[in-house]
Amino acid sequence: MSSLGKAGLEDVVVSTSDICFIDGREGRLVYRGFDVDDLAAHSSFEEVVYLLWHGGLPNKKELAAHVKAMRSTANRKIPPKMIQMLRALPKKTTPMEVLRTGISALSAFDPDAADNSREASVRKALRLTTQMPTLVAAWERIRHGKAPVAPNPRLSHSANFLYMMFGKKPTPLAEKTFDVALILHADHEFNASTFAARVTAATLSDMHSAIVSGIGALKGPLHGGANEQVMLMVEKIKSPATAGAWIRKALADKARIMGFGHRVYRVEDPRAKHLRRLATELGEQAGNTDSVRILDTVAREVTADKKIYPNVDLFSGAAYKTMGIPTDQFTPIFAMSRVAGWAAHVLEQHGNNRLIRPRAEYTGATRATYVPVDQR
Ligand SMILES: CC(C)(COP(=O)(O)OP(=O)(O)OC[C@H]1O[C@@H](n2cnc3c(N)ncnc32)[C@H](O)[C@@H]1OP(=O)(O)O)[C@@H](O)C(=O)NCCC(=O)NCCS
């Protein structure tokens, strides 16, 4: 008898985990017991990283030490040879390709590369989480013929990234918006990229390899790549006035509309409302809310027609775009946040490991007769 469930491992529970809980019917997302709505309102990305890796909120002293480590130039900097390597890449290399290659290359410089002890893995997770923004920002500058900007230890994780991208400190609203976006993307249970990272970790491979697996899986348009596709759609739609007709035609043509639908949520993704609000506030400050207005019209039409709801990728890009971030950097930014979750899952997997090795239900021939090539 077939033991095959629904395609794509839908609803299959593959392991227990203490890190992240999703209630797809209520539209709730919880990290280590804390509702993401509360974390978005009161916490910081730096604190959420601690929460995910260590299982609880830090006390004042623990938070101060953790924040100091996350901001230290020693952790944030990438070696000069990496910068040389980036300069050697063709300028058309996409930021996600650079990220995948760069994170893999960073393991060659990491003093703990081959050490899978929890202590070493936490050190590597910290370096990867703090080096990733440096790498992403360095590529943005190098591909436009500019010199990379060195990290600034006086700036928060989010402010420092925007500073390294643009060479000037962000406004308080841009910093806050970016930080909340990072909080909201930090973990999401056994999503495709986290599962990929855990499968790699479960072979007792190392932190860098697991994170590279996560990046590879995140890149696709059905996962993290969707935020870029949403912005390309907004650019095609052009203005709020043309949004209704454009989306009705796309729905009639049975197009897949990026930024909608989810394997787990049956209601609106709880992260979408925060990103919508922040994108609106930023747009109002910049005097242009067109992207959000276009997306609101798209959301109304898609939900009415298909009964599917906005996911995390619908409004994030509108906020990033207003900050001046290019569209092809949206998915690397997703990775800059999700690396915290990937690392938490690698630590959990290594803490209680068994090889992840499912089976396939074979549907091919079983007794084919080999015929030499000159007789075929
Ligand atoms: C996220 C996603 C991959 C989940 O996929 P899934 O659980 O495998 O769901 P399916 O692709 O089987 O879709 C189920 C039904 O909803 C429809 N649907 C789901 N998402 C859709 C979308 N974004 N646009 C149009 N129709 C969609 C499918 O066509 C299908 O309809 P059918 O049963 O009539 O064939 C899917 O919703 C999607 O492709 N969304 C767009 C990409 C995106 O935003 N990804 C980011 C996720 S956070």
Image (cartoon, rainbow, N blue to C red):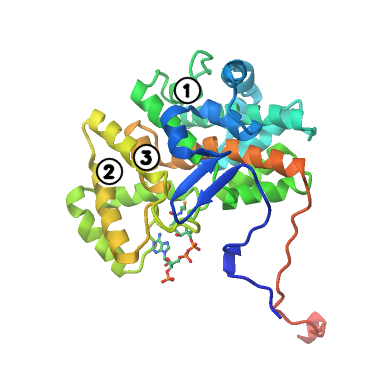
Locate the N terminus by quadrant: bottom right
Within 10 Å of disc 1 (Cα), the crowding (few <14, some 14-19, many 20+) is many
- Would you name the residue on which mark 3 appears? 275
CB of mark 3 within 8 Å of CB of mark 2? no
Q: Is label 2 or label 1 in front?
A: 2
**Who comes first in sequence, dot 3 or dot 2?**
3
Taking the image as drawn, is residue 317 in sight? no
Residue situated in front as seen by the camera: 21 or 225: 21
Q: Is residue 355 above or below residue 340?
A: below
Q: Is residue 110 left or right of residue 92?
A: right
Q: Alpha carbon of mark 2 to alpha carbon of mark 1: how far?
A: 27 Å
- Would you name the residue on which mark 1 appears? 164
Taking the image as drawn, is residue 289 in sight? yes
Locate residue 4: give its quadrant.
bottom right
Q: Amino acid at mark 1?
A: Met
- Would you name the residue on which mark 2 appears? 292
Q: Position of residue 52 (x, y in %)?
A: 60, 35
The answer to whether mark 2 is within 8 Å of ligand 1 is no
Residue drawn at the location 61% of the way across and 15% of the way down: 61
Residue drawn at the location 64% of the way across and 17% of the way down: 74
Residue situated in front as seen by the camera: 82 or 203: 203
**Label 1 SS:** helix
Q: Position of residue 260 (x, y in %)?
A: 39, 56
How many numbered marks are there? 3
Within 10 Å of disc 2 (Cα), the crowding (few <14, some 14-19, many 20+) is many
**Who comes first in sequence, dot 3 or dot 1?**
1
